[in-house]
Amino acid sequence: MEKEGSFINEVFLKLSQEKQERILNAAMEEFSSRGFKKASTNNIVQRAGISKGILFYYFRNKKELFSQLVDYAIKFIKNEYLDQLDDKEPDFLKRYSKAARLKMEAYAKNPHAFNFLGSIFLGNDDSIDEEIKEKIAYYSIKGRQKLFQNIDTSSFRKDIEEDLIFKLIYWSLEGYQQELISILKGKDLNQIDYDPYWKEFYSILSALRKAYYHNEEV
């Protein structure tokens, strides 16, 4: 069952937007890089430029901070990415290209949220509650369903299995996105000219259509 959680407490939300983001981003960076067990609240407050007393005024302990960060990151990705996915588009490449653009635009707004949830989903930290892991897995599955369900495969090549075409396209585009994220890591994402990257991305889409569709549409 879908459940977004309690999000961030109301007292914290009375802070300025800039200070909220500074604290949340510092915490997500720390948890992403070190995991829940090894994450240090000392590192978090140093990155955020606040005292530990202030951090624990808004969050009772590390566990509560972590749990509320999960709700915050899920809400951001749900609003900025998952809810915007066009699951009515029958053409897989068109649907996926729209999804990829949405994902990159959302990532540019808040890379910390994606990295934070990704580190939990892909990690193997047994100190994290199963409920949190299940919540993240639920939204991951929901996103994949929106990408893959109700696709018209009539234009796929008939000499390659449909499931394999899905996988090859998915691996190609996910690989490009990960390469792009790696290239942009550490840069000011708001100052980047994305046009050359999108031009390259659409060239990849064109090549994939030629490779896996029998009715070319470039």
Image: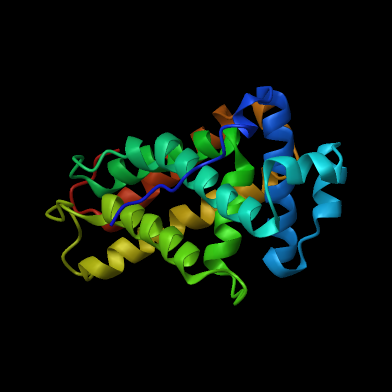
- Looking at the image, which residue sits at the far left? 154
Residue, x 39% and y 45% (percent of image)? 205
Q: Position of residue 145 (x, y in %)?
A: 27, 56
* Horizontal side, residue 144 vs residue 54: left or right: left
Its colouring scheme is rainbow
Q: Which residue is found at the position 19% from the left and 57% from the top?
A: 156
Residue 96, x across and y down, in percent: 34, 46
Say left or right for 51 vs 117. Answer: right
In the image, residue 166 sits, relative to residue 93, either above or below, namely below
**Is any part of residue 213 visible from this angle?**
yes
Which quadrant: the N terminus? bottom left
Q: In this view, does 17 lie above or below 133?
A: above
Q: 57 or 16: nearer the eye?
A: 57
Position above or below: 50 against 121: above
Q: Can residue 210 be seen in this view?
A: no
Where residue 150 sits in the image (x, y, percent)? 16, 52
Q: Looking at this view, is 114 or 199 the one in front? A: 114
* In this picture, residue 82 sits left or right of residue 36: left
Q: Which residue lies furthest to the top in this view?
A: 16
Q: Residue at x 57, y 48 (%)?
A: 68
Residue drawn at 73 percent across, 59 percent down: 33
